[in-house]
């Protein structure tokens, strides 16, 4: 194997024996760089193997020894050795994914487990930390491998780590060896166990109405714990410690599977009800994903009736929590992959064979190959490529807010521009949650130098990309830039239709851009302003008065002949604020920077001389957009 460069501590590798004339079983022993980590053994089946390798920062030279099950003719075991080099470059400049365990203020600090498990490994907070940490490194190994398979290198999120007693090897745990490993934040909730367990996810209980309350509890607790400063963002994948299986009610209490955020804090939550089945160390990964012990519902849950055995429970717990982590990283539900519950086969990524499945009531796969494994969807890895948690030191920084613009042009088409480059567009019909069609504009394996700054999309081209199309439904597009930002077109046909076109008084055609802001009351009205100075040479624009308070109420344009044009109304700050133009030097308005959410929160004037006004209104609310005028047409809602 050739030298690799990776960015995660635990690397997933797979391979096969060369010159293998007949199927061979045995084991691969991994000897880590300079014996920096205890050796581990991994099963070989039909000449194939999969293994996890612990890496040290910098160059690593790793040895693999294969020992077959069968002895040679002279009675000795023949050992075959291979070496490969891998360079581990930690991504300390990227924001980390934090792992947290949420505990009630009166929590007993235990999780559900059968008596035999409790006797063997315990079910307290220290055991929970080890298991959750190992699950996190499995997420990381899985994601890094998936990014590589899609041709995007081994990009991956990193964890918030600290110097502590290592748990990734059982020998580290027993000997007290210290390592830099993922920190598990223990966060106290303000709620009691009873308050948490009275709230349940509607997925489990159709009569539950307050499953989202658990997410609110988690958001509040994380916000208080991390003490975010203005402008900061945090990404937290959290587990409720006090989840409990209620056999009589046939319900998992204190559990919700939700992921999302508020723009600064992004959280994914899951329960601890499958935690007993997780591996605690690297050495336990293969045994955990092949443990056929039946789930004893006297003590633990059979989640969604898909956790009938221990290895299947590990799939559900580790995989479904990864699904929620995908949500907090910006991934919606997809047509396939982790974001469509394909994590029920997560075990196949780490094992070369599969045990009997109670879910399918069938024998497992003799040899788990890539085509049998679950995956991230292509649209997930596209999001990851541009997510700050996946940034590499070699990436060109994208400072400031993006300036994507979308406006209609002739031919039932729309032109889209973005200075950072356009990456891809997702296509949906109204009412369809999952995206089945998309267009990519850049070859990500060759960097972003070929990313187009401007594209034109036609209705015919978009419908051609769809397997089937219903003209009676709205055509919705979500367009992504190479900065990872996006804008949504709710009705593409309307955007490029007749309503988006207008004529200037001098006969020239003009086109409206996308709407900024959204009407939130029934009496909202649309207004159009066409600058008189755009078509009448005798009209010279001298100044602009902006009426604003916590939002923009109106804008008035004043001309040299003492006339004015009012857009909106005069309100907010008495008299508003005035921005003057240097008409003697031909300075004119070239565009606007707009902060918009449900309405126009703030606005800034851009001029042909390169000047910018102050930002009038609430400069921190909404999202930022840059709007460049064309033919002097201006529309706000």
Image (spheres, rainbow, N blue to C red):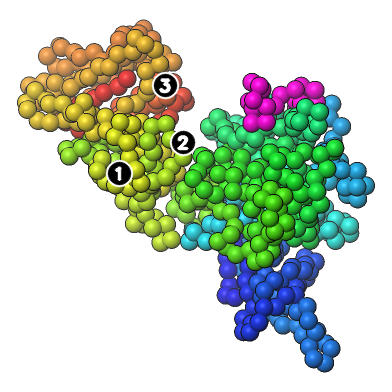
Of discs 1 and 3, which sits in the foreground? 1
- Specify the segment rendered in magenta: 187-214
- Please, what secondary structure does the residue beneath circle 2 have? loop
Q: Nearer the viewer, residue 169 or 544?
A: 169
Lower position in the chain sequence, tag 3 or tag 2: 2
Q: Is residue 171 left or right of residue 414?
A: right
- Placement of the C terminus among the 4 image quadrants: top left
Q: Residue at x 77, y 85 (%)?
A: 78
How many numbered discs sit on the rendered protein?
A: 3
Residue furthest front in the image: 361
Residue furthest right in the image: 119
List the residue tagged with mark 2. 433
Q: Nearer the viewer, residue 637 or 288?
A: 288
Mark 3 and mark 2: Cα distance apart in space: 22 Å
Q: Classify mark 1: residues with Cα within 10 Å, few (<14), some (14-19) or many (20+).
A: many
Of discs 3 and 2, which sits in the foreground? 2
Q: Residue at x 77, y 50 (%)?
A: 310
């Amino acid at each position: 194997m050739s030298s690799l460069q990776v960015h995660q501590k635990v690397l997933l590798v797979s391979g096969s024996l060369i010159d293998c004339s007949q199927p061979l079983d045995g084991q691969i022993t991994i000897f880590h760089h300079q014996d920096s980590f205890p050796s581990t053994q991994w099963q070989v089946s039909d000449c194939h193997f999969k293994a996890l390798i612990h890496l040290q920062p910098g160059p690593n030279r790793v040895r693999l020894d294969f020992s077959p099950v069968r002895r040679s003719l002279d009675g000795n075991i023949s050992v075959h050795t291979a070496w490969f080099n891998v360079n581990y470059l930690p991504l300390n400049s990227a924001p980390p994914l934090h792992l947290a365990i949420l505990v009630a203020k009166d929590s007993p600090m235990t999780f559900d487990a059968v008596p035999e498990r409790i006797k063997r490994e315990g079910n307290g907070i220290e055991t929970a930390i080890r298991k959750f940490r190992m699950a996190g490194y499995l997420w990381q190994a899985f994601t890094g491998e998936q990014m590589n398979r899609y041709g995007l290198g081994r990009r991956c999120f990193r964890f918030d780590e600290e110097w502590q007693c290592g748990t990734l090897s059982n020998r580290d745990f027993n000997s007290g060896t210290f390592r830099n490993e993922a920190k598990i934040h223990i966060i106290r909730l303000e709620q009691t166990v009873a308050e948490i367990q009275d709230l349940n996810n509607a997925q489990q209980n159709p009569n539950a109405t307050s499953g989202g309350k658990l997410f609110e509890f988690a958001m509040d607790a994380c916000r208080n714990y991390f003490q975010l400063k203005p402008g900061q963002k945090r990404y937290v994948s959290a587990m409720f410690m006090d989840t409990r299986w209620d056999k009589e009610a046939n319900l998992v209490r204190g559990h919700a599977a939700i992921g999302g955020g508020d723009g600064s804090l992004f959280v994914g939550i899951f329960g601890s009800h499958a935690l007993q089945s997780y591996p605690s160390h690297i050495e336990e990964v293969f045994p955990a994903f092949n443990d056929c012990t039946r789930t004893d519902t006297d003590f633990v849950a059979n989640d969604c009736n898909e956790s009938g055995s221990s290895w299947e429970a590990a799939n559900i717990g580790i995989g479904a929590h990864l699904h929620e982590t995908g949500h907090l990283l910006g991934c919606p539900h997809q047509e396939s992959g982790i974001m469509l519950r394909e994590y029920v086969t997560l075990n196949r990524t780490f094992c070369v064979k599969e045990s009997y499945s109670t879910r399918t009531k069938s024998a497992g796969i003799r040899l788990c190959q890539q085509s049998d494994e679950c995956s991230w969807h292509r649209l997930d890895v596209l999001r990851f490529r541009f997510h700050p948690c996946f940034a590499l030191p070699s990436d060109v920084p994208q400072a400031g807010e993006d300036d994507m613009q979308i406006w209609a042009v002739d031919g039932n088409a729309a032109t889209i521009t973005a200075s950072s480059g356009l990456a891809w567009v997702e296509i949906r019909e109204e009412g369809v949650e999952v995206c089945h069609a998309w267009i990519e504009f850049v070859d990500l394996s060759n960097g972003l130098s070929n990313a187009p700054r401007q594209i034109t999309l036609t209705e015919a081209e978009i419908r051609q990309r769809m397997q089937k199309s219903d003209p009676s439904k709205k055509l919705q597009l979500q367009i992504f830039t190479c900065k990872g930002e996006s804008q949504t077109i709710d009705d593409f046909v309307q955007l490029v239709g007749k309503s988006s076109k207008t004529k200037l008084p001098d006969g020239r055609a003009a086109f409206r851009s996308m709407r900024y802001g959204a009407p939130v009351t029934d009496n909202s009205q649309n207004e159009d302003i066409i600058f008189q100075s755009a078509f009448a040479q005798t009209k010279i624009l001298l100044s602009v008065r902006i009426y604003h308070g916590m939002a923009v109420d109106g804008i008035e344009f004043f001309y040299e002949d003492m006339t004015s044009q009012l857009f909106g109304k005069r309100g907010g700050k008495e008299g508003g604020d005035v921005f003057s133009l240097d008409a003697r030097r031909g300075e004119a308005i070239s565009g606007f920077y707009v902060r918009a959410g449900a309405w126009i929160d703030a606005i800034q004037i851009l001029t042909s001389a390169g000047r910018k006004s102050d930002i009038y209104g609430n400069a921190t609310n909404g999202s930022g957009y840059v709007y460049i005028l064309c033919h002097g047409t201006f529309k706000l809602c």
